[in-house]
Amino acid sequence: MKKLYPDRGMIKWQGFLLSEHNEQLQQTSNEAPPLFLDEQALEEMNQLVLESYHLRKPVSIEVNTFGLPYIQGSGVVKSLHPADGRIELVGSGSYCIKDIVSICFQEE
């Protein structure tokens, strides 16, 4: 059953909360939910990364920055570090694989 007024219970008690509690409530409401990609999207992303690595095709990626605009990077995959969970692009730097939101081949 969906509530029509989800904040109904909180309004009543907010006068009794300490300022630290209010700050904590605001922080938890501002946090972005973690990214959950389905199995098919992860497999497709893995395929694009491996193809870029082996065939030297340039890719364009977007990385989640959790609250800020996405970081965009592009280049050929230089190396993969599965132990660290990182991917390195030529001329663009190193990115955490779990934070990558999208990846596609660059238009030439």
Image (cartoon, rainbow, N blue to C red):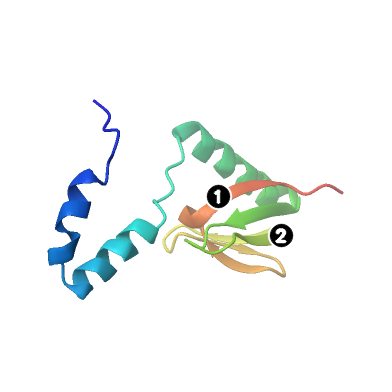
User: x and y percent of residue 74 in the render?
Assistant: 71, 59
- Residue 44 in percent (x, y) is at 58, 37
Considering depth in this image, is 54 or 85 the residue closer to the camera? 85
On screen, 3 above or below 33? above
Q: Is residue 3 left or right of residue 55?
A: left
Q: Position of residue 95 (x, y in %)?
A: 55, 64
Q: Which image quarter: residue 72?
A: bottom right
Name which residue type carries label 1. Val
Residue at (17% x, 64% y) in the render:
15
Task: Please report the residue visible at 18 percent of the width from the left and 47 percent of the height from the top.
Answer: 9
The image shows a total of numbered marks equal to: 2
- Report the front residue among 47 and 41: 41
Query: Which amino acid type is marked by label 2?
Result: Ser
Kindly identify the residue that appears in the image at 16 percent across and 53 percent down. 12
Q: Which mark is residue 48?
A: none
Crowd class of label 2 (few under 14; some 14 to 19; many from 20; radius 10 Å): some
SS for callout 2: strand
Asked if labels 2 and 1 touch by Cβ distance under 8 angstroms, the answer is: no
Q: Is residue 93 above or below residue 82?
A: below
Residue visible at 26% across and 62% down in the picture: 25
Q: Residue furthest top?
A: 1
* Residue bearing the label numbered 2: 74
Q: Residue 28: x percent and y percent?
A: 31, 60
Q: Nearer the viewer, residue 12 or 85?
A: 12
Q: Residue furthest right?
A: 108
Left/right of residue 21 with respect to residue 36 in the rendered view: left
First in sequence, mark 1 or 2: give its number. 2
Quick one: which residue is furthest to the bottom in this view?
Answer: 19
| Residue designated by label 1 | 101
